[in-house]
Amino acid sequence: MSDVAARLAALHAGAFDAPWDAAAFETLLGQAGVFLAETPDGFILMRTVADEAEILTLAVRPAARRRGVGAELVARGVAGAAARGAARVFLEVAEDNAAARALYARAGFVEAGRRPRYYARADGSRQDALLLAVTLAARLP
């Protein structure tokens, strides 16, 4: 495993109840169109295909949350997607993740769809995923 994959997996484990392991990150990092933006306290992993991009995951250390790290990473990721030719960026977020939804709304993302019962919770319940999107041309001054 690469040091990068191990580092991402460790940070992801601190940020999520169902984290991805180093092997998953190693596989993703080897795929065409996948790119990474990092800070010491977080990272965003994205994929571009043709003129679309997807936020695969965004992780911020819990101790660094509410300090602008997530907003910085989203901005860097969206800029990276635009530089790679993306006209639109998508992501999925749990409907009950109010903090993430607010972060993405501030970045201009709007609801574009729903995946019912997409996320499994530790207690056995299921949570809808909201499909959010931002059109990059709409962000230009």
Image: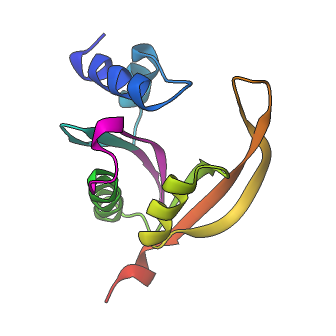
Q: Of 9 and 31, which appears nearest the observer?
A: 9
Above or below, 50 against 9 in this view is below
Q: Quadrant of residue 71?
A: bottom left
Q: Residue at 44% of width from left, 61% of height from top? A: 103
- 108 shown above or below 86: below
* 48 sits left or right of 125 in the view: left
Location of residue 4 in the rendering, given as x and y in whole percent from the top left corner: 25, 23
* Image quadrant in which the N terminus is located: top left
Identify which residue is drawn at 22% across, 16% down. 3
Q: Position of residue 75 (x, y in %)?
A: 31, 62
Indicate left or right for 32 with 18 as reference: left
Q: Position of residue 107 (x, y in %)?
A: 41, 69
Residue found farthest to the top: 1
Is 112 located above or below residue 18 in the figure? below
Question: Which residue sits at x=50%, y=63%?
Answer: 102
Residue at 49%, 30% in the rendered image? 16
Q: Is residue 9 visible?
A: yes
Quadrant containing the C terminus is bottom left
Q: Seen from this angle, which residue lies furthest bottom? A: 141
Q: How many marks do you count on the picture?
A: 0
> Would residue 61 be visible to someone looking at this image?
no
Residue 84 falls inside the magenta stretch: no
The color scheme shown is rainbow
Residue 50 magenta-highlighted: yes
Residue stretch rendered in magenta on the structure: 46-68
Give coordinates of residue 43: x percent, y percent: 31, 40
In the figure, is residue 26 to the left or right of 134?
Answer: left
